[in-house]
Amino acid sequence: MENYAVYVPRLVKKEDNFAPGHRACIGCGEALAMRQAFKALDNNVIVVNATGCMEIFASQFPLTSWQLPWIHTLFENAAAVASGVEAGYKAMKRKGVPLPENTKIVAIGGDGATSDIGLQAISGAMERGHDFTYICFDNEAYMNTGNQRSSATPFGAMTTTSPMGKKSFGQFSWKKNMPEIAVAHNIPYVATATHGYPFDLMAKVRKAVDTPGPAYVHILAVCPTGWGSATDTVIRQSRLAVQTGIFPLYEVENGVYKMSIDLPKLRPVTDYLKIQRRFRHLSDDIIAQIQARVKLEYQKILEKADVTKRAKGKSKTGPRKAPAR
Ligand SMILES: Cc1ncc(C[n+]2csc(CCOP(=O)(O)OP(=O)(O)O)c2C)c(N)n1
Ligand code: SF4
Ligand SMILES: [Mg+2]
């Protein structure tokens, strides 16, 4: 993997910006991913947190896991609040208010907050070119309210609102491709990550936050409670998502795609599906559809990575750089 060691030294700092002692379920991948993400950052960060599991389990009054300035927002407006914080910080700086230099704004939300209800605010903030990072912690359903389907729930997965039975085989639509939606905004940095590859995750979060302008990191976070999987397989599930091609790890820097891990051969999707109760009811036919789709989508990213590698330096128009604000 290129640039792997540039952003995060192998010896990760001991201090946590997101401290233990919170109330996440045992084995929660979201809590683990959040700890990794904020370990990669210094303490010059303001966190804007949409409602969801991560906000509920880490901020029960009068306690908090956050060792950073932190704002809880509504479900739908984390990116709008982050835009306001960034604009306010810059305005106060211009007026000579003595604020710390180099403050970073990081908005975080679950897949429901990101792919569904907060999408408009995220799109607006990206389009306006705010200097902030948005991190989606994707556990593939509305988990905090009891596992309802979102547009990021994978095809076939059973949730309380995409049940399996005579008239339903689980989630009926294919997972919304949020990283590609972010790429379509022509922002300087987009990446995917998961907690089973912690150094990769930390490097990407660091890079996103250090990038001027909008950056987006999409993190797959295993939810053993909602997915019906064993808590001691959370890391394995995260890695299998990558190794089967279900959740490819890649970066898009100024429009240039780069695969983070070069897999000579993908493992069959059943390796991942069979250890989660949410997929246990799937017929061979549905599994074959999932396998075909994964292969197709993986190939598309490989091609983009290859094409942009070859085209690098030749484009005259290129993607937009973050505007000076
Ligand atoms: C406008 C609005 N609708 C519904 C809710 C109830 N609600 C709070 S958290 C949540 C689920 C969050 O799902 P997601 O963003 O995926 O985060 P997760 O809990 O899965 O980490 C819902 C539906 C709300 N707070 N506000
Ligand atoms: S429901 Fe899932 S995401 Fe939420 S705290 Fe429990 S394990 Fe974590
Ligand atoms: Mg969720």
Image (spheres, rainbow, N blue to C red):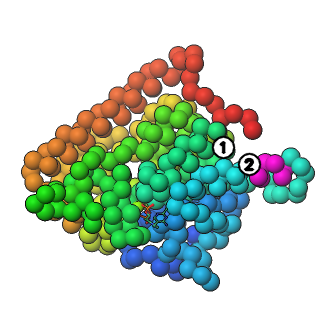
Please report the residue visible at 53 percent of the width from the left and 18 percent of the height from the top: 315
Q: Secondary structure at mark 2?
A: helix
Left or right: 318 in relation to 114: right
Spatial separation of the CA atoms under disc 2 and disc 1: 8 Å
Residue 71 x %, y %: 64, 65
The amino acid type, in three-letter code, at marker 2 is: Ala
Please report the residue visible at 23 percent of the width from the left and 50 percent of the height from the top: 172
- Which quadrant of the frame does ligand 1 lie within? bottom left
Instruction: Name the image quarter holding the C terminus.
Output: top right
To which residue does mark 2 refer? 87
Q: As displayed, is residue 208 above or below residue 281? A: above
To which residue does mark 1 refer? 130
Quadrant of the rendered structure where residue 289 is? top left
Quadrant of the rendered structure where residue 45 is? bottom right
Q: Residues within 10 Å of mark 1 (few under 14, many from 20)?
A: many
Q: How many marks?
A: 2
Please report the residue visible at 71 percent of the width from the left and 59 percent of the height from the top: 44
Q: As displayed, is residue 100 above or below residue 285? A: below
Please report the residue visible at 45 percent of the width from the left and 25 percent of the height from the top: 308
Report if residue 266 is visible in the image.
Answer: yes
Q: Are marks 2 and 1 in contact (CB under 8 Å)?
A: yes
Q: Nearer the viewer, residue 282 or 316?
A: 282
The amino acid type, in three-letter code, at marker 1 is: His
Q: As displayed, is residue 68 above or below residue 111? A: below
In the rendered structure, find residue 312 and report the number of the disc placed on it: none
